[in-house]
Image: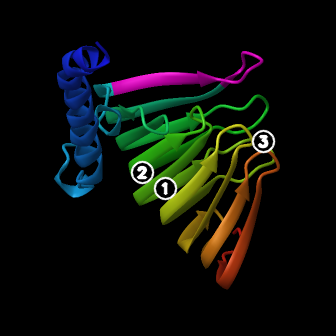
Amino acid sequence: MVLDRLARAFPLLLLTALAALAAWLNNATEIEALMPPRAHDRPDTILQDAHSVMYAPDGTKLYEIQSAEMQHIPEGDITLLKEVRIDQTPSGKPILHIKGDTAKLWDRGHQVELNGQVTLRRDDYPGIEPLEVATSNLQLDTLTSKANTSQPIRARTPSRDISSVGMDYDHEHSQLVLKSKVQITYEPAH
């Protein structure tokens, strides 16, 4: 009687063991390079001629962003942009315009890295000179309005031509800190 039950259960036990062995072999021989990309590695949204506005938690407008193409990647909640323009409009401060060939946004859009031909331009404002900076890479924190780069820069104000390797820019305090190999040509007003 026990042998009868065992004889009936044997095919089921054998099938379970074979299924477990097949699953183990499948996992053991999986080669990442040969696997198709996972869905979360690919964009889940692609927009052409995109325009969006980001707001701070208190509801104040942080910046407007325009790009020729915007792709959202679910993995890491990253947004990739092409031909991007960012306009920050802080209250009581000059408008800050930033352009780049490409950009990557993360941390809910508060962290931005721009690459390619990047320009940062501060508009003229009472008591604050306009400023234009050109570089190849720029990190921007949209919450604090701070930008930095370790790459060479060329900057221009109405009275100065500036070159440097690396900079920190604080838009809130209209402060530009140059890092190294600094050269400034001062042009006095006539």
Q: Position of residue 132 (x, y in %)?
A: 57, 58
**73 vs 189: above or below:** above
Mark 1 / mark 2, whichever is N-terminal: 2
The amino acid on which the numbered mark 2 sits, given as a three-letter code, is Gly
**52 vs 154: above or below:** above
Residue sitting at 54 percent across and 71 percent down? 154
Q: Is residue 21 left or right of residue 62?
A: left
Q: Position of residue 121 (x, y in %)?
A: 57, 50
Q: Which residue is mark 1?
A: 119
Q: Which residue is mark 3?
A: 126
Q: CA gap, disc 1 to disc 2?
A: 7 Å
The amino acid on which the numbered mark 3 sits, given as a three-letter code, is Pro
Can you tell which mark lies on residue 173? none
Tell me whether circle 1 and circle 2 mark residues in contact (CB < 8 Å).
Answer: yes
Residue sitting at 55 percent across and 53 percent down? 120
Specify the quadrant that holds the N terminus.
Answer: top left
The amino acid on which the numbered mark 1 sits, given as a three-letter code, is Thr
**24 vs 31: above or below:** above
Q: Position of residue 30 (x, y in %)?
A: 24, 51
Residue 98: tell me if it is visible. yes
